[in-house]
Amino acid sequence: MSAVVIAEGAPEWRRLLAADYAEHVLPIYEAQYPDDPRPRHAIETARQYALGRVTAQEMAAAGGARAAVWAASDAWAAELSWQEDRLRAYCRGHLPAPVLNLLAKQPP
């Protein structure tokens, strides 16, 4: 199999990046719904579509899995919250107080 070269920022690149992000939080969803393979299938289908290995019709057929991916948004929200907490903890330990005070005054 030959390597596929995709330019950064191209629609295919963005699809692959989205699939990577979704796959990153997939374990959170699967811990809640271990018998639901739809999100994993949707992610793999989206990745194959971005690589040109799945037709638009096959992508549309995987549309039922899209609902499960949206259901995983709670998992994504939990992941974002965790990342924000980690970033705040890191900043408290590494940024000078005046910068932290300035950031605290900024709206989220």
Image (cartoon, helix red, strand yellow):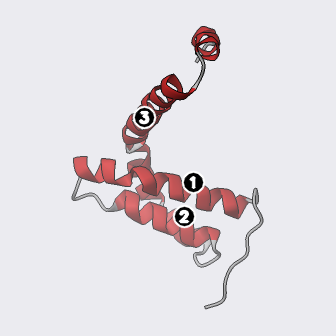
Expressed as whole percent of the image width and height from the top left, the position of residue 107 reads 61, 13
- Label 2 residue SS: helix
Q: Which mark is residue 46?
A: 2
Q: Is residue 107 left or right of residue 90?
A: right
Identify the residue position indicated by label 1 in the image. Answer: 18
CA separation, marks 2 and 1? Answer: 9 Å
Marks 3 and 1, the one that precedes in the sequence:
1
Q: Which mark is residue 64?
A: none
Mark in the foreground, 2 or 1: 1
Quadrant where the C terminus sits is: top right
Identify the residue position indicated by label 3 in the image. Answer: 77
Marks 2 and 3, the one that precedes in the sequence:
2
Quadrant where the N terminus sits is: bottom right
Neighbours of disc 1 within 10 Å: few (<14), some (14-19), many (20+): some
Image marks 2 and 3: residues in contact by CB distance under 8 Å: no
Neighbours of disc 3 within 10 Å: few (<14), some (14-19), many (20+): few
Residue type, mark 1 in image: Ala
Above or below, 63 against 76 in this view is below
CA separation, marks 2 and 3? Answer: 21 Å
Above or below, 4 against 10 in this view is below
- Label 3 residue SS: helix
Expressed as whole percent of the image width and height from the top left, the position of residue 103 reads 61, 16
Expressed as whole percent of the image width and height from the top left, the position of residue 84 reads 48, 30
Residue 7's image quarter? bottom right
- Label 1 residue SS: helix
Mark in the foreground, 2 or 3: 3
Measuring 66% from the left and 56% from the top, which residue is drawn there? 14
Image marks 2 and 1: residues in contact by CB distance under 8 Å: yes
CA separation, marks 3 and 1? Answer: 15 Å
